[in-house]
Image (cartoon, helix red, strand yellow):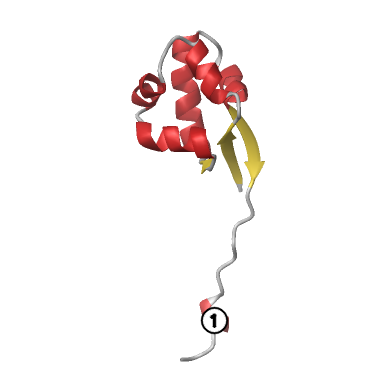
Amino acid sequence: MKMYRFRDTAKDQIERSGHSQADIARIAKYDYREMNKRLLRGGNVRPATANRIARAYSEVAHVSHDHALQLLFEEITVERAERPSLATSEPR
């Protein structure tokens, strides 16, 4: 499954735009606390969320959406944990 993670330089990129993380989060309609946590401690975000944040950044930094996505995020692949099939589960 494709996911995104903030780059180590994302916080600096946002500051260079002249806007705060809170501004970007508000424009993206994303919780500021969650964004701050992901920026500082890492953690994955879904593609739709990464796209919303990149779109908000692109508006304030006057760069293309694709460039914003590239500046702020790295794409990663996460393996989904397989759930046991109900048909093969043992009776209780």
- Residue for point 60% across, 17% down: 67
Q: Characterize the local packing of mark 1: few (<14), some (14-19) or many (20 or more) Cα atoms within 10 angstroms.
A: few
- Say which residue appears at 36% left-offset and 23% top-offset: 22
- Residue named by callout 1: 87
Spot occupied by residue 29 in the image (x, y as percentages of width and height): 34, 29
Looking at the image, residue 59 lies above or below residue 10: above
Mark 1 secondary-structure assignment: helix
Q: Viewed as shown, does residue 84 lie left or right of 23?
A: right
Position above or below: 23 against 84: above
Residue 52 lies, in percent from the top left, at: 45, 28
Q: Residue at x 60, y 24 (%)?
A: 9
Q: Does residue 9 appear left or right of residue 35 in this picture?
A: right
Q: Residue 13 or 91: which is nearer the viewer?
A: 13
The vertical placement of 46 against 64, above or below, is below
Whole-percent x and y of residue 61?
49, 10
Does residue 48 show up?
Answer: no
